[in-house]
Image: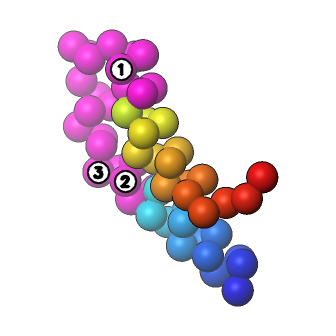
Amino acid sequence: MVCDEISARIQKARLDFANLRHLWRRRDIRLPTKGRVYCATVRSVLLNGSET
């Protein structure tokens, strides 16, 4: 079912975001770099397989 697939995708992205907590808290890493990491990991998991 589509709803189950979306829920699984959200859960996976949430886990990926939580696993990067050490990165988000570091002050020596600039915000644009953190944004690129977010787009490459968390957002790509959310959008993987989605149709426009």
**Gap between marks 2 and 1 measured at Cα:** 16 Å
The label on residue 19 is 3
Q: Nearer the viewer, mark 3 or mark 1?
A: 1
Amino acid type, label 2? Asp
Q: What residue is at 52 percent from the left and 45 percent from the top?
A: 43
Residue 4, placed above or below residue 39: below
Residue 40, placed above or below residue 30: below
**Gap between marks 3 and 1 measured at Cα:** 17 Å
Residue bearing the label numbered 1: 33
* Percent position of residue 34, x then y: 37, 25
Q: Was residue 38 drawn as part of the magenta stretch in this picture? A: no
Q: What residue is at 70 percent from the left and 86 percent from the top?
A: 1
Crowd class of label 2 (few under 14; some 14 to 19; many from 20; radius 10 Å): some
Residue 38, placed above or below residue 18: above
Residue bearing the label numbered 2: 16
Q: What residue is at 30 percent from the left and 41 percent from the top?
A: 21
